Amino acid sequence: MRAVFMADPAAPPALLRLMFHDCQVQGCDASILVDEDANGVQITSEITAARNFGVRNRDSISYAKSLLESQCPGQVSCSDVIIMAARDAVAFLGGPLINVPLGRRDSSNIPSSAVADSSIPPPNIQVGDMLRLFAKKGMTTEESVAIIGAHTIGATHCVNLMNRLYRSDRPSTDGMNPAYELMLRSACPRFSLTPNISIVANDLTMVTFDNHYYRSLMAGQGALAIDTAMASDPRTAPFVARFASDQDQFFNAFSSAFVKLSYSNVLTGNQGVIRENCARM
């Protein structure tokens, strides 16, 4: 994975996002890696979901899996490779090295794009819905705020910001810093022809896994609505402030949340399969 990260600076956040999207749909089972033409049969696969727009680096997982197959055939699942790649991505960018349990198996049941779209949270998710979503994964409020801290690396596509920036009925309590809003509007103009391509950094240290994200939130500089809302909601604001002032506490809570997410609804033992080719059933 280090070779992948060195060749492509955007790979670490992409692999972390890949893990989130895989685990969110029906558990961490590598179903997101199956191509829509798997085994020569056209299927409406999970990866074609609208909310999986921009998911990339699936080929990096397949590459790592092929190396494992050459040394340990049939022993390591694609789902474990996804988790280990995401773990390594966090550590490579300066975050904690998380000790994750292994032994997952891959699903032989691939959800449709409709199921994926109904399971992956929208970019305008509210604090209450976010807390309920992660509570189903066994996370506390502190861990929920910490796992959203994955936004400390990478960028957000403008298409996910257009509604927030230009809706006529946006609440006055939105909390976005006016100067920051002007910057976002400049980067993502209302009638842009390329909102699916244009991006904005999640924070000023987008290639470093640190607590700068939380300091930005306290200044009203969160790109997504959930970012800004967490800094003002009484349920989450104390944790935002705590993580902004203490990076170690953020790392500890993020590590705990990461492990809970990575072991959500996993298949083990005789359940599922271990795919030889991650993109094929």
Image: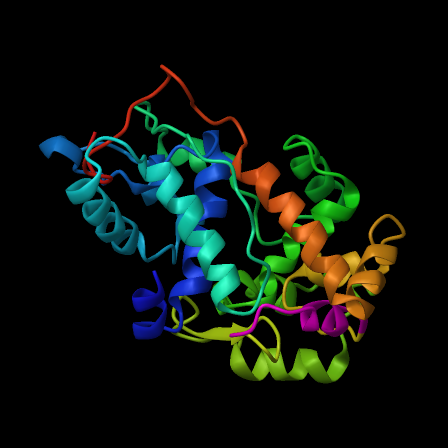
Q: Position of residue 221 (x, y in %)?
A: 71, 74
Number of residue marks: 0
Q: Residue furthest left?
A: 40
Q: Position of residue 83 (x, y in %)?
A: 44, 45
The reply to whether residue 173 is visible in this rendering is: no
Quadrant for the N terminus in the image: bottom left
Q: Which residues are magenta?
A: 207-218
The reply to whether residue 257 is visible in this rendering is: yes
Q: Position of residue 76 (x, y in %)?
A: 31, 36
Quadrant for the C terminus in the image: top left
Name above or below for residue 247 compared with residue 55: below
* Quadrant hosting residue 264: top right
Residue 70 as seen in the image, left or right of residue 95: left
Please give the name of the residue rendered at 58% of the width and 68% of the height, measured from the top-left corner.
Answer: 209
215 part of magenta stretch: yes
Name above or below for residue 244 compared with residue 15: below
Q: Position of residue 124 (x, y in %)?
A: 63, 53
163 part of magenta stretch: no
Q: Residue furthest top?
A: 270
* Quadrant hosting residue 9: bottom left
Residue 221 as seen in the image, left or right of residue 235: left
* Quadrant hosting residue 260: top right
Q: Nearer the viewer, residue 69 or 30?
A: 69
Name above or below for residue 8 compared with residue 21: below
Q: Nearer the viewer, residue 133 or 12?
A: 12
Q: Residue furthest front?
A: 71
Name above or below for residue 65 compared with residue 150: above
Q: Nearer the viewer, residue 151 or 119?
A: 151
Please give the name of the residue rendered at 40% of the width and 18% of the height, measured from the top-left corner.
Answer: 269
Please give the name of the residue rendered at 77% of the width and 77% of the height, measured from the top-left corner.
Answer: 177
Q: Nearer the viewer, residue 253 or 43?
A: 253
Please give the name of the residue rendered at 47% of the width and 34% of the height, measured from the top-left corner.
Answer: 25
